[in-house]
Image: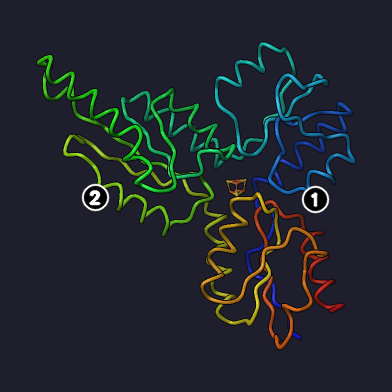
Amino acid sequence: MEIEKSREIGLCFGVRRAIKLLKEAADKYGKLETLGPVAHNQQLVQELAKLGIRPVDKLEQVKSKILAIPTHGISPSILDKIEACHVHTIDTTCPIVSQAQNTAKKLAEAGFDIIIFGEAEHSEVKGLLGWTKGKGIAALEAKQIAVSSWLLRAKALTLSEAKGRERQNNLFRLGIISQTTQSWPALIEFSRQLMVALPAKVEELRIINTLCQATQRRREAAIELAKKIQLMIVVGGHNSANTKHLAEACSPIIETHLVARAREVDSSWLVGKQRIGITAGASTPDEAIEEVVAKLKSL
Ligand code: SF4
């Protein structure tokens, strides 16, 4: 049996940077907390907990004087609340996420309504929505936008038109950005569907690519590998968006399984398979990948 790893695999620079910052802070201050998991990988969170770095779900649960902001970033309103708590912060927000936040902020300040292509309940997207200053909405499907804010907005426009306001004042300026870990083909399709559904009141439309290139490279490399092997194992957190997208990208090509830990590998998957591919999400520690490789070899 031959096992081939993807040429782009595992921890991205954003998560590596966060781990480095957290370890330095733990060395300096001892114990500290992170607002939510630093990245969506349980094994990574457990490893950091051994160094005294623990996640809390809410600001009210913070006990230490040092609080780390996770790689996914947070909204400005949460930042204000943290400041009011007088805790020292370690900001591990990935620079790619900071860039997306800045884009959302600038669009809002320039008078744009903002549509975020992404999972509304994902922590990064919740943070991005905060930076739109109430002018944003997030969805994975264009039709979700059509049935919510668009109808309400259209109704508001009709009312203001009835009051005889200048037509120019009733035009939309619309910006589309993306959760950093979505894929380029999915963003294109989302934007296409949205443009078809747009009312004629759009004065200006800007689509800004806020995708993370590290994620795109992992996806492309995984697809390339999937075409050469008989079984693909994707290693990473079941709640990690970019890990799930890797599995979704490989599934139409070849039998694919997502596992968080080596113990989840099922020996029946290997029956009749000579060439097995391995890829891993951007928050998957190297140890988790090596454990899975060792398990496959043992089987
Ligand atoms: S996947 Fe991309 S955006 Fe997310 S932490 Fe890594 S480098 Fe940053």
Does label 1 or label 2 sit earlier along the sequence? 1
Q: Which residue is mark 1?
A: 43
Taking depth in this image into account, of 289 and 245 the one nearest to the observer is 245
CA distance for labels 1 and 2 = 43 Å
Is the N terminus in the top left, top right, bottom left or bottom right quadrant?
A: bottom right
Image quadrant assignment for residue 75:
top right
Identify the mark at residue 210; answer none if there is no mark: none
Residue drawn at x 75%, y 37% as measured from the top left: 21
Instruction: Classify 10 Å Cα crowding around label 1: few (below 14), some (14-19), many (20 and above).
Output: some
Vertical relation: 241 (above or below) 20: below
Identify the mark at residue 196; answer none if there is no mark: 2
Image quadrant assignment for residue 82:
top right
Taking depth in this image into account, of 56 and 222 the one nearest to the observer is 56
Vertical relation: 196 (above or below) 124: below
> What amino acid type should be assigned to the residue bearing mark 1?
Gln
Residue drawn at x 29%, y 28% as measured from the top left: 152
| Secondary structure category for the residue under label 2 | helix
| Residue found at the very far front of the displayed protein | 147
Is the C terminus in the top left, top right, bottom left or bottom right quadrant?
A: bottom right
Residue drawn at x 37%, y 34% as measured from the top left: 114
Give coordinates of residue 188: x percent, y percent. Answer: 36, 55
Instruction: Classify 10 Å Cα crowding around label 2: few (below 14), some (14-19), many (20 and above).
Output: few
Give coordinates of residue 209: x percent, y percent. Answer: 41, 47
In this view, the mark in front (1 or 2): 2
Give coordinates of residue 83: x percent, y percent. Answer: 66, 14
Vertical relation: 90 (above or below) 238: above
| Secondary structure category for the residue under label 1 | helix
Taking depth in this image into account, of 91 and 39 the one nearest to the observer is 39
